Image (tube, helix red, strand yellow):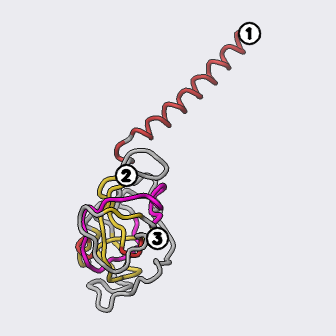
Amino acid sequence: MKLKKQLVILGVAMVLALSGCGNNSNNKNDTSNMNHSEMNHSGSSEVPQGLKAASNPKFKVGSQANITDDHMPGMKGATATIVGAYDTNVYAVSYTPTTGGEPVKNHKWVIQQDLKDAGDKLYESGAKVVLEAEHMKGMKGATATIDSAERTTIYMVDYTPTTGGEPVKNHKWVTGSELTAK
């Protein structure tokens, strides 16, 4: 009887251990998490050195706007509170994380001040740059290819995801074309 009880306990332990392993491997292969699962959704209100506040932004600090893009689940349709507005060069980039794993394609957004030794010039699509931003694990120090580039006003925003969950504070970055008046 004692042996039977031990076998049952051992069997339950094995099932629990194997089910835990199954869940972890599924998360690694989930393509919906591939690009932004490691993203720092909330961040510090600190901005990179040299970034200047916009003199006349379309969306004023303290105002609200609707987010029209979905960098991450729950962004599109959320109400944003503008916490910062800055004029700079902004880039969508593709790179392979320094920590390994799948390449990140068309990451939106990094700014001029997030690039190593960037200076002031606007990089063209196809240019290679080194990232200094830490929006996602493995981003800092990665060599990236510029997918798109433009000079615009970039915004730091607070919002509550439409999918529920905790409010996101100081999200970096959203462009003015990804916002509409509230």
| Lateral position of residue 1 relative to residue 115, left or right | right
Badge 1 crowding class, 10 Å Cα cut-off, few under 14, some 14 to 19, many 20 or more, is few
State left or right for residue 142 relative to residue 20. Answer: left
Where are the magenta residues, as a range?
133-160
Q: Residues within 10 Å of mark 3 (few under 14, many from 20)?
A: some
Question: Which numbered disc covers residue 100?
Answer: none
> Which callout, 1 or 3, points at the residue further toward the start of the chain?
1
As measured in the structure, the alpha-carbon distance from the residue carrying label 1 to the one carrying label 3 is 55 Å
Q: Nearer the viewer, residue 61 or 149?
A: 149
| Mark pair 2, 1: CA separation | 49 Å
Amino acid beneath label 1 = Leu
Q: Amino acid at mark 3?
A: Lys
Measuring from the top left, give residue 36's x and y in whole percent.
Answer: 39, 54
* Front residue of 134 and 157: 134
Q: Is residue 112 above or below residue 96?
A: below
| Point 26% across, 79% down: residue | 152
Instruction: Give the percent coordinates (x, y) of residue 124.
Output: 24, 68
- Provide the residue designation for mark 2: 35
Q: Visible in this render: residue 139?
A: yes
Residue under pointer 3? 169
Tell me the mark number nearer the camera, choosing from 1 and 3: 3
Label 3 sits on a secondary structure element that is strand
* Disc number placed over residue 3 in the picture, else none: 1
- Is any atom of residue 76 visible in this view? no
Q: Name the N-terminal-most of marks 2 and 1.
A: 1
Contact check, label 2 and label 3, Cβ < 8 Å: no
